[in-house]
Amino acid sequence: MKGKLLCIALLSCMSWSLNAFAIRSNGSEKEGQNGAAFVGYCEGTQDELEYYAPTPDQLADSISYAIALSPELLKENGNLIHAIRVALPEFPINKGKIWITNTLGKAPLLVQELQETIPGWNYISLDHPFDCENIDKKIFVGVTFWGTDRRFCLEDTDERNLNADWACLKGGWVHLFLGSYYGSNCAVGVQAMMSGGDYSKKTPQYDLAIEKVNLPAYASISEKVTCSVLVRNLGVQPVTDFKIECDLDGDKQELEISDIFLPAGDAYNYAYETTFSKEGEKEYTWKVVSMNGGVADEVANNNRESGSTDIYEKCFARTPLLERFTGQGSIYACICDYRVMLAAENFGRRIAQVSYYPFDASFSGATLGVDAHNIVANAFDVSEVLYVLLDRTNLFGESPYSPAFDPVNVISQEMIQDRLDTPAFVDIDLKESTFDEKTRKLSVKIDGVVAKEIPNLKINLFITQDSIIAPQSISGSDYCHNDVMRAALTKNVMGDELTVSADGTYHVEYTYVVPEMIGFTNTDLSHMNVVAFVSSYEDHIFNTMEVCNVRSVPLKDLPSSLASISEIQIPINVSCYVEGKRVYINGDYEYAEIYTPYGTLIATVSPNKNNIEFSEGGVYLVKVLAGNGQKTFKLLLK
């Protein structure tokens, strides 16, 4: 134990998108009497829920978790609870409350509404400190919160946490177990912040903790990487001086923060930029120490954080692809779509989605299926609807209805985040694509880079549509269908061969006139999307079709034509070239203008600077002016 903190649940997570942790006792009955910990519901008719894990049929609109404090712990470690720390998930919460009670499910002894919260640990000072001096029975300190359009259930996998996270309760050890919320993942934890009594005299007044480390899971050589660490003051006294130490793969940095005022409970974020010159796994360790009084390393078990990041010669940000095999003939398809929506809702356009409607010809209300849907379904040997594909590497749905009802097989936020944290080695650029709404002509120009040798590459190009109101289920009820695949622009539905040049670049073009109706359903241009992705597989071996990367753009966001920057044919002695993500302009000129392919001016360069760096690759137009002459360069930044 340390500082003014009675630590009942210690979570050492780098990211709050990791698995949730359920706390269960692994000590003897005698040890358990010294203090128990639990995660689960605190509502309903249950009186004792220390080791209660709800089953999937016990869904609720709220979730609660807490710690249990015995009278012995309260008397020995302080007489006041002046604050509570709770770990909250990444998804938005509608409302929440912290509470203290002596009987679960009964009226609380103290309750306080959550105000502004953040994902991860929240330090909440009690409006009225809770006096523990005359408490003669076990009390529970916990939190309850309600999510946005979300129902909760805790699944206990009964597996020991591989990170070996522990919490010690008066000589009895409590193990942290892996678990996940139904439809979402989040870290959980509660800590009671106590003061007073003999306990506070034995420990330092100043206590700093590393709450969160932000470092990309991967990066390219020479790419600028931002590292940051969030430091929280867990002590009772304010901190004015502290030291941050960082060892990033042998590159050691030390920063002394002084002349600040960091009150109890407040946080300080420190960030800096760095680059890597070699490939490989780079390990890091952050450490923070208060210089007001300090905390001994052996007891400050949350003042350091270690991990690693992977560095590659060249890699790109990944956009995962979610593909659903659904239908109009079953109400269960709606449930499957809803489960996928819950998992995907927080990622926005960081992921792309496509829905297929095969096997519905026998349903009289079927209007969305096209031949391409059955071709894709047959390629993956999907014989029933209600299956989900993630980047064509994981197929969820061992039985027709399992994605709808089985929390083990349903797609989760953690699975999507794992793909986002996996580097891509193929880049896709749609910046030179256009769409003329008057003629309904779509011109798709795809430029890209392949950073390493990948066999059997295919380019795939689909048109999808959202917000289609069409019949659903045997009752004929209308339902809003999203991400519906309307047409494949590639000659082969499963993708055309992609030719990559010796320098690793590729370029393909497709044109398509969007009809006013596809099948039995109108096309609404305001709700249509272009989805382009590169996959890798051998012909007729469709279980190896991993999606290398995806780009999706709404049809309405494409310009009707690309920028046309005329060039006056008066020679000027200038040159322009690319090095990494920096554009260099050499020669005698007055100034240069840099445009996107759509004609948007994004930068002006003067001769005394002569170069500019871009954060993203892509196609850029550089117009250089000198006197009455000008020269335009078209450059591709990889």
Image (spheres, rainbow, N blue to C red):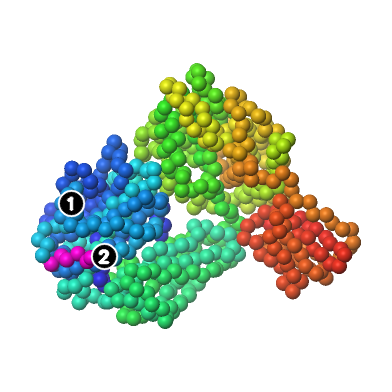
Point out the image quarter for the C terminus: bottom right
Please tell me which residue is depicted at 74% across the width and 48% down the height of the picture: 562
Q: How many marks?
A: 2
Mark 2 neighbour density, 10 Å: few (under 14) some (14–19) many (20 or more): few
Q: Is residue 503 left or right of residue 571?
A: left
In the picture of the structure, the residue carrying the numbered disc 2 is 127
Q: Is residue 82 left or right of residue 347?
A: left
Q: Is residue 118 above or below residue 41?
A: below
Q: Is residue 432 above or below residue 406?
A: below
Q: Position of residue 439 (x, y in %)?
A: 73, 35
Residue toward you, 398 or 604: 604
Q: Is residue 130 magenta-colored?
A: yes
Q: Position of residue 428 (x, y in %)?
A: 63, 48
Residue 308 visible at all: yes
Which residues make up the magenta segment?
Answer: 128-133
Q: Is residue 294 left or right of residue 626?
A: left
Please tell me which residue is depicted at 52% across the width and 65% down the height of the picture: 226
In the picture of the structure, the residue carrying the numbered disc 1 is 107
Point out the image quarter for the N terminus: bottom left
Q: Position of residue 13 (x, y in %)?
A: 37, 59
Q: Is residue 103 magenta-colored?
A: no
Residue type pointed to by label 2: Asp
- Dot 2 or dot 1: first in sequence order is 1
Q: In terms of secondary structure, where does tag 1 sit?
A: loop
Residue type pointed to by label 1: Ala
Please tell me which residue is depicted at 63% across the width and 27% down the height of the picture: 517
Residue toward you, 624 or 320: 624
Q: Is residue 17 above or below residue 576?
A: above
Q: Is residue 410 above or below residue 578?
A: above
Residue 493 visible at all: no
Furthest-right residue in this view: 570
Q: Position of residue 120 (x, y in %)?
A: 37, 58
